[in-house]
Amino acid sequence: MFRPAYPIHTRRLTLRPFTMGDLDPLWSYQRLPEVAEHMLWDPRDLMQVKVALERMVKEDRLAHEGDCLSLALVDRESGVVAGQVELVWLSDRHRQGEIGYVLNPRYQGAGLATEAVREVLRLGFEGLRLHRIIGRCSAANAGSAALLERVGMRREAHFRQNSWVKNAWRDEYVYAILRADWT
């Protein structure tokens, strides 16, 4: 089992498990159409965010493959939850994981998501001893693709019209980084 020592501090962020007290800041961005645009979900109402938060509150460790570590991205200067970042343990045998992230648009463009993703990659490689970590994004989400490239991930695939999302076919990029490339 892997459970990081919390809180985790980076230069400008505190990464920590979610609490039910994070409902309002989470809802402040998960309800926005521009946030939901590239997600699998539509803009969420308060009850949908509450249900998602109840799940994320429990995701503070990785005990078995398939588990998800969901962390609140807290801006250290303001103390506000600026987004979320996650690490999913995909395979124990193949030592693989997947990262994901969502950022409140008010905090985009300042490098906070990049800082958080770098820290979660470190947790995956150093804490969970993963061999390979992937990141996926909609091919239409240029900002997300650029973030994955900034942290050293390489685009390995462009799946054309591989998923039916919100009544349309969606292209997807898959990026990956190996532990050897990280160190």
Image (cartoon, helix red, strand yellow):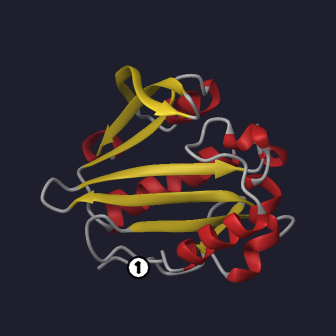
The spot of residue 98 in percent (x, y) is 38, 50
Q: Is residue 133 left or right of residue 7?
A: left
Task: Identify the residue at image location x=12%, y=59%.
Answer: 93
The residue at the far left in this view is 93
Task: Identify the residue at image location x=72%, y=69%.
Answer: 47
The spot of residue 167 in percent (x, y) is 56, 30
In the picture, residue 9 is in which quadrant?
Answer: bottom right
The quadrant of the rendering that contains the N terminus is bottom left
Q: Is residue 73 left or right of residue 27?
A: left
Task: Identify the residue at image location x=70%, y=81%.
Answer: 20
The spot of residue 113 in percent (x, y) is 64, 47
Task: Identify the residue at image location x=82%, y=70%.
Answer: 24
Circle 1 is placed at which residue position? Answer: 3
- Does residue 114 sit above or below 148 in this rendering? below
Q: Is residue 154 left or right of residue 34?
A: left
The spot of residue 176 in percent (x, y) is 35, 37
In the picture, residue 108 is in which quadrant?
Answer: top right
Label 1: few (<14), some (14–19) or many (≥20) C-alpha neighbours in 10 Å: some
Q: Nearer the viewer, residue 133 or 58?
A: 58
